Amino acid sequence: MKNQNKSIYNNESISALKGADRVRKRPTVIFGSDGVEGCCHSIFEIVSNSVDEARQGHGRKIIVTKFEDNSIEIQDFGRGIPVDYNKTEKRENWELLFCELYAGGKYNEEDYEYALGLNGLGLAATQYASEYMDAEIKFDGSLYNLHFEKGENIGGLKKTPYGKKDTGTKIRWKPDLAVFTDIGVSDEYFRDMLKRQAIVNNGVEFVLRIERGRKLETETFVYKNGIVDYAGEIASEQNLTSIQFWQAETAGRDRPDKPEYKVKMAAALTFSNRVKLIEYYHNSSFLEHGGSPERAVRQALVSKIDGYLKQNGKYLKGESKISFTDVEECLILVLSSFSTQTSYENQTKKAITNKFIYEAITEFLKQKLEVYFLENPEEAGRIAEQVLINKRSREKAEKTRLNLKKTLAGGVDIINKVEKFADCRSKDLSRREIYIVEGDSALGACKQGRDAEFQAIIPVRGKVLNCLKAEYDKIFKNQIITDIIKVLGCGVEVTSKANKDFSSFDISGLRWNKIIICTDADVDGFHIRTMILTMLYRLTPTLIEEGYVYIAESPLFEINTKDRTYFAYTEAEKNTIIEKIKTGKNAKFKLQRSKGLGENEPDMMWLTTMNPDTRRLIKVTPDGAEDTARIFDMLLGDDLPGRKDYIAEFGGDYLELADIS
């Protein structure tokens, strides 16, 4: 019997989305995402229309308001949107602009030669994707109002006389949760977006208002000299060279058979050994992924700086050529370009692909750099020197990374590679434990007292390096540390950008279920324990976060009676045990400080420290990680004033523990 529910695919199966459904049912096609990223892009589309007006010299202020209900209002003081009847199209302009995709005034290059929104999608697409949209337009002596709900106009165009001379457009709308999965756009997005628009639109004032409890908090973004002021802000007087501002305009084609178009370019550039930044903008849009401008910058700067190094004999004999990585480490560059034709990678405008724009920016930067180096030989020398420092540091780091990888590479014969490491027999990762013990003497007692089936031992010999203060290359030359990392088997985590190539962490390589730090219960033992924890905190923090790290408590006191031996791990426990003994039949006892690990008999080590049934382990947890990091940095790092203040305030509490003779 045939399936009666089987769908039929024929000529009548083909359908087309119409009207608002073209956006509401397929938002990812227009906005790149149906999540909060797509919602952000819809906001940017409306802002871009106001920016294009301001760039044409119509209104130098744009106000963006974010309301608590996630609705948005954008107001400009441009010429206002023409919304009356269009004789050419034989339709109302408001219908074309608010309801028709690929309609707009920016296809006329005379009106918008260098426009951010060129494709006519933004206003209509955002309107279609809104729960509601209200528009108030002051244009040609009249006040116009429009209202839309879920992509449909309600009530048509309302027109009333307006006696004042000011013009402009105010649009308020609420993104629709039926279109986007999330409309909770962060305050930071608005700040970042408006600041970037201020950077590349000299002197245009962007006002951000955020509603909180029916009050509006206001921030203003404006850069009088645009990208030059921004480059200076980033450099913050830590630049090696003066800030250069270059600009040019040219025209060309992507292919011989394609039409000619214009390109304007402006660059603000300086070099620093403290900060770095490279940002690309095109037609006021921040190019997060660069595209043609990024390729041009890479080509031009490497070519000209490499040429300078060769010409002036700066390379050592046989030395390799610089890379763009070496240049960008000391470069502050803000590049803003405009073109009358633009090929974006997609509608979200995060990269452009024009061949001629790449060629134009490459030639522009090469010419400007050549003149700059000739006219500023001292600054050119400083740039060359810093780029070479970056290159040689990178190569040294790479060599260190490769050596580290080789050093930390563990295999089945690891027992033969790490001195005095005693492995266990079990291959079951859920059982295997590694004890990190203090010194060779403790190694002997622990090795004899352990259960060799699942407990392994590695001794810490000599002084442990303070990993919070040491550079990575020094850390990885320390035999104690590299031995421990080898035995752990999971590599190291390096978060610093300058040394990220050292990172080799893979938790799946961890060979142990428990990592147990076992040191004497005295000042020296506490210090060694702290140094080991510091090492793990800096090099393998995930092991702490995932709960693999433990501290084995060693007893402070032994209390011997005729019948048994008691162990006390704190003063309070000692007092409780003694009271219990005194109230018993045999009140005689002998109290003594517990011996160091190396002096204990193997059976006592097993009983007090290693037997899972009787030992006491303290699990090291990430709770209060920020406070722990602060204390570690203050006591063990470079915070000398903080350490001095702490000792002055609390030092008296620890006098009895101090080793003062």
Image (spheres, helix red, strand yellow):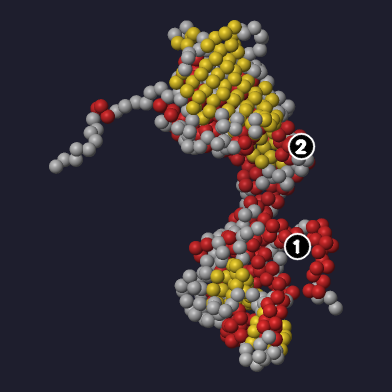
Residue 564, label in figure: none
Which picture quadrant has residue 282?
top right
Q: Earlier in the sequence, mark 2 or mark 1?
A: 2
Identified at 72% across, 83% down, the residue is 593
Residue 137 visible in this rendered orientation of the protein: yes
Q: In the depicted view, which residue is nearer to us: 75 or 212?
A: 212
Identified at 64% across, 7% down, the residue is 163
Q: In the depicted view, which residue is nearer to us: 308 or 209?
A: 209
Identified at 57% across, 21% down, the residue is 171
Identified at 50% across, 15% down, the residue is 94
The residue tagged with tag 1: helix, strand or loop? helix
Q: Amino acid at mark 2?
A: Ser
Outermost residue to the bottom = 562
Residue 147 percent coordinates (x, y): 51, 18
* Image quarter (top left, top right, bottom left or bottom right) of the C terminus: bottom right
Residue 195 percent coordinates (x, y): 66, 32
Are discs 2 and 1 less than 8 Å apart at CB? no
Which picture quadrant has residue 461?
bottom right
Disc 2 and disc 1: Cα gap in Å? Answer: 40 Å
Residue 170 percent coordinates (x, y): 59, 20
Q: Amino acid at mark 1?
A: Leu
**In this figure, what is the number of numbered marks?**
2
Say above or below: 110 vs 370.
above
Say above or below: 83 vs 426.
above
* Image quarter (top left, top right, bottom left or bottom right) of the N terminus: top left
The residue tagged with tag 2: helix, strand or loop? loop
- Residue identifier under label 2: 242
- Residue identifier under label 1: 635
Residue 261 visible in this rendered orientation of the protein: no
Query: 10 Å neighbourhood of mark 2: few (<14), some, or many (≥20)?
Result: some
